Image (spheres, rainbow, N blue to C red):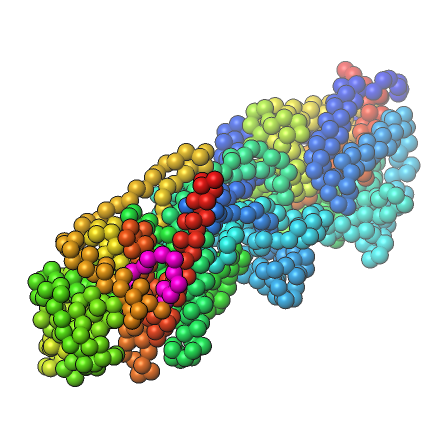
């Protein structure tokens, strides 16, 4: 036998095999010793997930500490992408378990499945971040999901804070709403650490104070298995809540203002004053200011809604529907209204300050002037009485002599036609009538582009092209009441950090003092007082039986449409002697200043003094 | 004159080390998997592996004391039985399918993989046949072709299951034996080329094999699909570093690496025990194979030599393929790591073959 040959071959083979093994050792060494960092990084990225923990946004409380906007914890369900096949299977099971959930109300399993798939599709670019499929899931469903946990790989159940509106529609437009940050906002705030899916204040205070309200996101670092089921907990960074806003608003007064406004707007429709086609809602606003500080005590806007809709899934169609109704618009600052007779204090100021007339000068009102009808024949009328009875003839006559320049100048002195600077986004500036504006509007029309006598007459009673916001009108009433001081209205008194430390305080801000003599203002206040308190005053009916002394001015402003609609306006301040609050009420197409807007102001003032007395009582003993 | 002595203790010790390490790693790699349905039992795989190891050790001691030349008597019969079983397992309803492959026969509570049995039978038969006609091997038709044909037939049947890894091992082992026995290289080269062509065809024919093969060339191309095995295997092996994450502390077991307790257990070893652990395992195998070849060389007769060479070659080929696949040195094909991977038949027959090897070592003639 060729023993030696065999042995040689064996050794050759042994060498070959050992050689192969050495190659493998070198390969293992290369992978484990040279490329180790690369693979460790890869492994960490693959195996670890930072599950973000949303931070609660800052709350908002009113001046008395009553919560207007808070947060409540809700269960959320998210799903991680596990590859098409597995995800489809899990989504199918998940959909069946989510039947009957609020956000999928009335939907069949297949429809829910479709909805979830759509959401996953949307996030295709960031596959490793879980996709939220349901917010505000009921406890029963959570229990059911937990039972089926092992059949639902990649499904996470978390607790997240969502906005809570304990007072429903109260202050809805001022507060604004929160939605997921959009692409534009994301780009604009790139450097501030925002991520897709973060909450972002879209309107109102939520938007204006976004940097304060926003908290700092925390996170839970977990190791997951290949089906994204958490297997090991690696650590956690606690979220930090946002700062709390203390509002100047008195929520009780706000409630009264809001309810009164919507009640009387509805009345206007019922009584046929408001002739609005096609079931469109009546719009309007009511603003209550502290005349000594500029604090906004109440700011109501109609039509209103309950922002709780934003804490659930809000489909685009439904958002469009609500938006079309105008419920998101704050009509106190974002809408301009023809002021009508509430402008007459401007005309009065102009003619006194411009020395066009003596305060006591009298005219005779036959019920018409130069082809324009007054709403009634007032007989002998002086300035105070003209304000009391809202005599157009008086203002026609003096309006012509005062002229648009003087009237415009004093409108501006009161801050009309310019933004008040309130701490809300989207405030409109309004517009003061002027020959220049008319020329612009009627460009090309030889006759109408000129300013005529009748334009001065129109302007003097607040028609022509005058259009102001409710907040401007309230600030104008406040300036009359407080002796010509123009404050910048504000809604936030202070900002409190999560620990309780006050990080910012906002004192009253005096924007400027109107260049109007105290005497003039006194005469105007007297006229407004007579309008509210003396028989024959246009607002006397409104304040019948009131236990306080108010001063007021009504306005019924034609909007110039074919249906003959008119805005209902009402300005007031009280108490007459030592004014504390000023109010403006506007009901678009409300028809009657004293009949529709007036009662709103009355209810607000009654409530204001009631609250004053009640809060004093405990101190009295 | 044959004198029976104690077996090669170095070989035995090496084997026991590998076996023990394997049991520990099977437990570690299934720590998470075993707790999921349908197992719901942390010790599910550990318990089974222990039972199989005991059966395997019993078989090994049996074979260690059964004189190897007596196997000649059974070689033909056993091979016929084995090939018959390979056919039986393919019959729908008889063979048991798992993960898309029909490889198992059910024997009450246990299941049995005929391919593992055939592998051993073929080695015994080939060693027996070649040792009888060492002088005829120059003749290709009568001396070589029958063995190649038998190996080809077995490998073909195994491929139908399909089980490419075992088929390649079988063919590779018989080739090494033929070469060791003195068959001319030129003859083997021609058959080798034909065989490579056949494997190429097998790859080309089955879309999943082609996908795996292409994934081996560029795993990043389809990281969630065909590249998943390779990427995750490399990720866990590579992240082990020098010292590893520590026993039981790895990530791969959380289903990241597929077949983590069977074909890819080496990745878990590399991750948890680091380069030190991985290199230790490879060195143990080198030691085992070196001692195995030594047994072959010192065997008193050519049957013993060829039998020992065949057994060692089979294990060596399997280890090289397995570690080659895990380290992405070779394209993906499923095969267990001998003595370490979880698995019943493969463990029992591997241990039985080591028993034969140890028996041969008892008759070593030293110079």
Q: Nearer the viewer, residue A89 or B158?
A: A89
Residue A563, image quadrant: bottom left
User: Would residue A158 appear left or right of B29 to someone viewing this image?
Assistant: left
Most foreground residue, A99 or A354: A354
- Above or below — where is B258 with respect to A172? above
Instruction: Using the image, determine if residue A391 lies above or below residue A104.
Output: below
Residue at image point 17% right, 65% down: A348
Highlighted magenta segment, given as a residue range:
A542-555
Place of residue A152 in the rendered image (x, y in percent of width and height, measured from the top left): 67, 50
Q: Is residue B67 visible?
A: no
**Residue A229 in view in this figure:** yes
The residue lying at 62 percent from left, 49 percent from top is A155
Q: Is residue A618 left or right of residue B175?
A: left
Quadrant containing the N terminus of chain B in the rendered view: top right
- Nearer-the-camera pick, A211 or A108: A211
Q: On the rendered image, what quadrant is the C terminus of chain B found in?
A: top right
Residue A367: within the magenta? Answer: no
């Amino acid at each position: 036998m060729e023993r030696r040959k065999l042995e040689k071959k064996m050794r050759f083979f042994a060498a070959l095999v050992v050689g192969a093994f050495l190659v493998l050792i070198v390969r293992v060494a290369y992978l484990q010793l040279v490329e180790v960092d690369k693979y460790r990084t890869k492994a960490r990225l693959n195996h670890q997930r930072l599950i973000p923990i949303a931070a609660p946004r800052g709350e908002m409380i009113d001046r008395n500490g009553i919560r207007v906007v808070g947060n409540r914890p809700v269960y959320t369900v998210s799903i991680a992408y596990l590859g098409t096949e597995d995800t489809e299977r899990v989504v199918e099971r998940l959909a069946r378990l989510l039947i009957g959930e609020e956000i999928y109300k009335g939907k069949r399993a297949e429809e829910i499945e479709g909805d979830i798939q759509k959401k996953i599709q949307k996030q295709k670019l960031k596959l490793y971040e879980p996709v939220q499929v349901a917010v505000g899931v009921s406890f029963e469903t959570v229990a059911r999901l937990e039972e089926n946990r092992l059949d639902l790989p990649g499904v996470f159940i978390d607790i997240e804070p969502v906005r809570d509106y304990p007072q429903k529609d109260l202050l809805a437009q001022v507060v604004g709403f929160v939605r997921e940050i959009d692409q534009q906002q994301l780009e604009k705030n790139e450097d501030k650490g925002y991520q897709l899916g973060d909450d972002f204040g879209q309107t109102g205070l939520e938007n204006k104070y976004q940097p304060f309200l926003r908290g700092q996101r925390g996170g839970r670092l977990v190791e997951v298995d290949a089906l994204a089921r958490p297997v090991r907990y690696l650590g956690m960074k606690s979220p930090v809540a946002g700062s709390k806003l203390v509002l100047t608003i008195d929520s009780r007064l706000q409630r009264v203002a809001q309810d009164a406004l919507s009640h009387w707007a509805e009345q206007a429709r019922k009584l046929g004053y408001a002739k609005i086609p096609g079931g469109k809602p009546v719009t309007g606003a009511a603003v209550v200011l502290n005349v000594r500080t500029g604090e906004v005590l109440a700011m109501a806007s109609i039509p209103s809604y309950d922002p709780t809709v934003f804490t659930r899934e809000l489909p685009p169609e439904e958002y469009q529907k609500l938006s079309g109704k105008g419920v998101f618009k704050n009509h106190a600052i974002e809408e301009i209204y023809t002021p009508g007779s509430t402008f007459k204090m401007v005309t009065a100021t102009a003619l006194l300050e411009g020395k066009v007339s003596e305060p006591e000068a009298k005219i005779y009102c036959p019920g018409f002037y130069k082809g324009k009808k007054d709403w009634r024949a007032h007989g002998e009328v002086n300035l105070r009485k003209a304000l009391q009875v809202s005599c157009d003839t008086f203002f026609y006559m003096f309006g012509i002599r005062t002229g648009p320049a003087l009237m415009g100048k004093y409108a501006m002195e009161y801050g009309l036609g310019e933004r008040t600077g309130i701490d809300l986004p989207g405030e409109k500036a309004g517009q003061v009538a002027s020959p220049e504006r008319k020329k612009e509007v009627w460009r090309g029309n030889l006759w109408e582009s000129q300013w005529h006598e009748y334009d001065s007459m129109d302007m003097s009673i607040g028609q022509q092209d005058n259009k102001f916001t409710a907040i401007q009108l309230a600030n104008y009433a406040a300036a009359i009441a407080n002796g010509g001081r123009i404050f910048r209205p504000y809604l936030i008194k202070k900002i409190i950090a999560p620990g309780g430390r006050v990080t910012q305080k906002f004192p009253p801000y005096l924007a400027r003092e109107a260049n109007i003599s105290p005497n003039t203002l006194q005469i105007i206040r007297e006229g407004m007082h007579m309008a509210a308190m003396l028989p024959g005053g246009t607002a006397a009916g409104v304040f019948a039986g009131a236990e306080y002394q108010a001063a007021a001015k009504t306005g019924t402003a034609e909007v110039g449409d074919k249906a003959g609609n008119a805005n209902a306006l009402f300005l007031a301040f009280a108490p007459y002697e030592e004014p504390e609050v000023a109010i403006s009420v506007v009901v678009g197409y409300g028809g009657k200043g004293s009949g529709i807007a007036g009662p709103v102001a009355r209810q607000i003032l009654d409530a204001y003094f009631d609250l004053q007395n009640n809060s004093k009582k405990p101190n009295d003993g | 004159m044959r004198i029976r002595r104690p077996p090669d203790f170095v070989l035995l010790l090496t084997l026991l080390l590998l076996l023990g390490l394997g049991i520990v790693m099977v437990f570690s790699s299934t720590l998470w998997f075993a707790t999921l349905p349908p197992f719901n039992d942390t010790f599910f795989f550990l318990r089974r592996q222990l039972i199989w190891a005991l059966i395997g050790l019993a078989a090994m001691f049996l074979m260690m004391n059964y004189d190897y030349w007596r196997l000649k008597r059974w070689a033909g019969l056993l091979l016929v039985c084995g090939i018959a079983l390979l056919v039986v397992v393919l019959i729908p309803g008889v063979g048991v399918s798992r993960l898309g492959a029909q490889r198992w026969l059910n024997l009450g509570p246990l299941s049995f993989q005929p391919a593992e049995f055939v592998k051993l039978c073929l080695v015994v038969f080939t060693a027996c046949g070649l040792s009888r006609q060492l002088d005829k091997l120059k003749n290709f038709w009568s001396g070589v072709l029958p063995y190649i044909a038998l190996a080809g037939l077995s490998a073909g049947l195994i491929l139908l299951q399909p089980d490419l890894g075992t088929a390649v091992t079988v063919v590779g082992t018989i080739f090494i034996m033929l070469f060791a026995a003195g068959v001319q290289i030129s003859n083997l080269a021609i058959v080798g080329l034909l065989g490579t062509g056949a494997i190429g065809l097998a790859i080309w024919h089955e879309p999943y094999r082609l996908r795996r093969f292409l994934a081996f060339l560029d795993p990043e191309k389809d990281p969630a699909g065909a590249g998943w095995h390779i990427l995750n295997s490399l990720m866990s092996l590579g992240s082990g570093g020098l010292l590893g994450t520590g026993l039981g502390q790895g990530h791969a077991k959380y289903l990241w690496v597929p077949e983590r307790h069977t074909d890819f257990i080496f990745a878990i070893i590399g991750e948890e025990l680091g380069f030190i652990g991985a290199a230790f395992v490879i060195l143990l195998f080198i030691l085992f194979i070196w001692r195995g070849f030594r047994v072959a060389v010192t065997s008193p007769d050519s049957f013993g030599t060829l039998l020992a060479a065949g057994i060692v070659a089979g294990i060596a080929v399997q280890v090289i393929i397995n570690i080659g696949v895990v380290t992405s040195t070779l394209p993906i094909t499923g095969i267990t790591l001998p003595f370490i991977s979880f698995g019943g038949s493969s463990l029992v027959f591997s241990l039985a073959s080591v028993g034969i090897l140890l028996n041969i070592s008892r008759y070593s003639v030293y110079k």
